[in-house]
Amino acid sequence: MRPLFGRLLRVSNRSIFAFIFFFSLSSSCLYFVYVAPGIANTYLFMVQAQGIMLRDNVRTIGNILRQYTNKNSTLNGTDYPDGTNSTDFTAQSTMYLPENFTISPHLPCPEKLPFMRGPIDINMSEITLEEIHQQFSDMDIGPGGHWKPTDCTPRWKVAILIPFRNRHEHLPIFFRHLIPMLQRQRLEFSFYVIEQAGTQTFNRAMLFNVGFKEAMKDRKWDCVIFHDVDHIPENDRNYYGCGEMPRHFAEKLDKYMYILPYNEFFGGVSGLTVEQFRKINGFPNAFWGWGGEDDDLWNRVHYAGFNVSRPDGDLGKYKSIPHHHRGEVQFLGRLLPADGTLCTI
């Protein structure tokens, strides 16, 4: 009986050690998600994106094999893939106005100007605000980063709201890219940097609400864009005008491998007209910490009967300046009650 008892004791010890190991591992993972939800979500979305990419690659290989085996799907000088024709490809290249197009100070600025070339050269190297002031000193930029075109009448007046705390190295990089892009789009715009003071947990949503009220006191805007300071657009044809709002601009983030994490994702860069934002009663004020407020905004938008638009193709690509959410715990609740009651601005 002793050998059998000893064997059972050894199995029992292994089970205890395994339980302790997995308990410690799961506890560490939960603690990591709690104290660094931004990093945890990024890792989660990267794993999810890998699965989506693998599925899409398998599907693409299958389509290629089907085209190869289908004798009627040959490509020559007159045939085009997927049932398209030459006029489809011509339309894609002539969608924007030609180089010799002339604009007039007395006419509205077109939305598809020849100045909008597409991909932007992204420069993430550090730069100071003083250097930014010098770089744009001859471009008639007023206080608050206000600018409007003089060679045509701006079609839209856009307020850019930026929630901010301890990202001083990010602001100049942000302005380096956004100012030239918005000028090429011939929009009238101003930047409103809403900084949260003190040591209390960051409240991105409340900062947006405060920024909206202050912006409305400053000028009569057509729409508002809620823009994280660490998101840099990669294409200047991602038009920041107000015509297709509510709009989610940052559809494809590099940190998520340029794949939309989920259909209701409304984070990073989004925009609404002034009337739409007032109708949905703004952002919820009670989201302290990282995450949740964008999902709640999506719910408010759909509860009000609006549909969210997104840029076509790869126009919604953004690069993210690396940072961490450490020290900002995640708000795990959801604040939209079943009866549809909304928090007030």
Image (cartoon, helix red, strand yellow):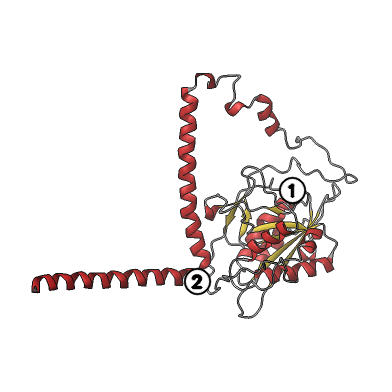
275 vs 197: above or below? above
- Of residues 13 and 190, the one nearer the viewer is 13
Task: Say left or right for 26 vs 190.
Answer: left
User: Mark 2 belongs to which amino acid?
Assistant: Tyr
Question: Which residue does the numbered mark 1 point to in the structure image?
Answer: 184
Single out the residue that lies furthest toward the right. 106
81 vs 296: above or below? above
- Of residues 3 and 57, the one nearer the viewer is 3
Label 2 Cα crowd, 10 Å radius (few <14 / some 14-19 / many 20+): some
- Of residues 13 and 130, the one nearer the viewer is 13
Task: Say left or right for 69 vs 318.
Answer: left
Kindly report the distance in space between the C-alpha atoms of the residues bearing marks 1 and 2.
42 Å
What is the quadrant of residue 167 in the picture? bottom right
Asked whether the residues under the numbered discs 1 and 2 touch, taking CB atoms below 8 Å apart as contact, a structural biologist would say no
Question: Which comes before the other along the chain, label 1 or label 2?
Answer: 2
Q: Can residue 123 be seen in this view?
A: no
Question: Which residue does the numbered mark 2 point to in the structure image?
Answer: 34
Label 1 Cα crowd, 10 Å radius (few <14 / some 14-19 / many 20+): some
Disc 2 element = helix
